[in-house]
Amino acid sequence: MTPTPPASEPAKAVLSIKGLTKRYRRLVAVDNIDIEVYPGDFVGFIGPNGAGKSTTMNCVSGVLAHDAGTIKVAGVDVLAAPVEAREHIGFVPQELALYGYLTGEEFLRFVGSVRGLSEEAQSTQIEELLTLTELTAARDRVLKEYSGGMARKIAICAALLGPPELLLLDESFVGLDPESTYRIRRRLERHCQEGGAILLSSHILEMLERVCTRFVIMSKGTVAKALTRTELDAAVAAGEYEDLTQLYLRVTGKDVALV
């Protein structure tokens, strides 16, 4: 008699946010939000300026300490074990902070060594990423000489090294030309196809609608709406919304300004 194979265990969340609250004195920037991101998820993190997206990402990455709730990355609490939690994260913040006197390759090798990559793995991945971002010719230039777009591309390269289970990308396509945007977008899709997860904040809603598998819309520090790609497609097919942009405008109340 052939034994019955065990039921597969449900996937564990790469990112689990429960009751997250962050205050700046009297301002409640993030108010008791819950978000879970699973392997393979490409999550579009959407909202107006000041909605709490960057604050949330900074709390997840450990740049900011939150006031209430829990954040776990790959099961690791970011407050209880911040160094271990960061091992599972690749983060490109909206405001970049690079080591200006390192060359592009020196910076990537530094990140690779921090992540515990062997010299061989560093060399292989760095070549692939520099080729992807067309920075091969700039590998020996110091970062303070990079343009804004080049700096953002080298930061994306650093985030992908490893690769970590979770990528946090905060407006990471700002300043990139269409060709670079296309190539990097395809590389990010591959990251998710290979079991990684991405939380991407961007105002380029047309791109998010094309690539993301889930959407989380923030408004005034709370999660105003969360839905899957399937749910969005069904709503569009039923005529509830024209597209993701119209859904976003309605949920956040921004459509009133267009009347």
Image (cartoon, rainbow, N blue to C red):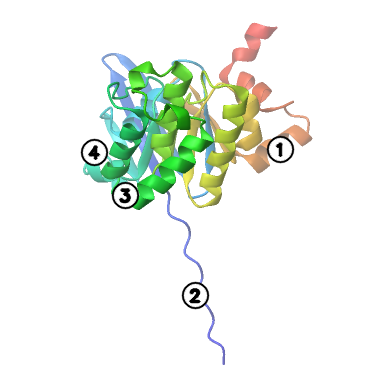
Sequence-first disc among 3 and 4:
4
- Residue bearing mark 4: 79
The residues bearing labels 3 and 2 have C-alpha atoms spaced at a distance of 40 Å
Sequence-first disc among 4 and 2:
2
The residues bearing labels 1 and 2 have C-alpha atoms spaced at a distance of 34 Å
Which amino acid is tagged 2?
Pro
Q: Residue at x 62, y 27 (%)?
A: 179
Q: Which disc is residue 119 wearing?
A: 3
SS at badge 3: helix
Q: Is residue 259 above or below residue 70?
A: above
Left or right of residue 107, residue 45 in this image: right
Q: Position of residue 132 (x, y in %)?
A: 53, 36
Q: Is residue 28 visible?
A: yes
Sequence-first disc among 1 and 2:
2
* Mark 4, other Cα within 10 Å: few <14 / some 14–19 / many ≥20: some
Which amino acid is tagged 3?
Glu
Q: Nearer the viewer, mark 3 or mark 4?
A: 3
Q: Is residue 19 above or below residue 179?
A: below
- Residue bearing mark 2: 6
- Asked which quadrant contains residue 185, the reply is top right
Which amino acid is tagged 4?
Leu
Q: Nearer the viewer, mark 3 or mark 2?
A: 3
Sequence-first disc among 3 and 1:
3
- Residue bearing mark 1: 233
SS at badge 1: helix
Which amino acid is tagged 1?
Asp
Q: Is residue 75 visible?
A: no
